[in-house]
């Protein structure tokens, strides 16, 4: 699968958020600040997962349609990935 710059940039932002969270812990910041930052990280990861799955689905559907194959398996695989990511 071809990953675009948008996905890489999202992961770099998440990496920065993780570093910020570590800094909050090292500086003994309030629980609320730490949890707020961790929640933002989780949300960013969830959005990135959705983007990766949607881009993959898009590429699979295009390929399947061009090859004259059934697309239902690609859709099912995408749904399974999203469900798995929420466990």
Image (cartoon, rainbow, N blue to C red):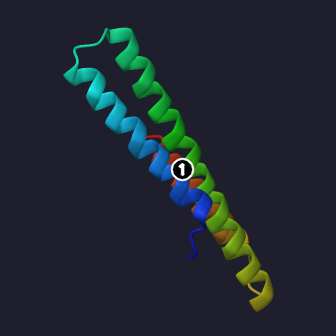
Q: Please name the residue shown 73% across and 74% down the image.
A: 61
Residue 14 in the figure: left or right of residue 65: left
Q: Of all residues shown, which one is farthest toward the bottom?
A: 67
Residue assigned mark 1: 10
Judge by depth and name the residue closer to the eye, 21 or 41: 21
Quarter of the figure with the N terminus = bottom right
How far across and down, in percent of the image, does residue 37 sit?
A: 43, 24
Judge by depth and name the residue closer to the eye, 50 or 21: 21
How far across and down, in percent of the image, does residue 68 sit?
A: 79, 88
Judge by depth and name the residue closer to the eye, 43 or 4: 4
How far across and down, in percent of the image, does residue 5 sit?
A: 59, 64
User: In the displayed structure, would residue 16 be above or below residue 82?
Assistant: above
Residue 1 in the figure: left or right of residue 69: left
How far across and down, in percent of the image, does residue 80 sit?
A: 54, 55
Quarter of the figure with the C terminus = top left
User: In the displayed structure, would residue 82 be above or below residue 44?
Assistant: below
User: In the displayed structure, would residue 45 be above or below residue 55?
Assistant: above
Q: Please name the residue shown 67% across and 75% down the image.
A: 60
Q: Please name the residue shown 35% across and 19% down the image.
A: 34
Q: Secondary structure at mark 1?
A: helix
Q: Quadrant of residue 33?
A: top left
Task: Mark 1: give few (<14), some (14-19) or many (20+) Cα within 10 Å.
Answer: some
- The number of numbered discs placed on residues in the rendered structure image is 1
Q: Please name the residue shown 60% across and 67% down the image.
A: 4
């Amino acid at each position: 699968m071809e990953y675009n710059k948008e996905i890489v940039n999202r992961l770099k932002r998440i990496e920065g958020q993780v570093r910020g969270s570590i800094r909050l812990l090292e500086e003994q910041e309030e629980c609320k600040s730490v949890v707020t930052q961790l929640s933002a990280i989780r949300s960013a990861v969830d959005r990135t997962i959705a983007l990766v799955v949607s881009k993959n689905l898009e590429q699979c559907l295009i390929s399947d349609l061009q090859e004259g194959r059934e697309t239902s398996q690609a859709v099912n695989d995408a749904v399974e990935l999203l469900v798995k990511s929420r466990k």
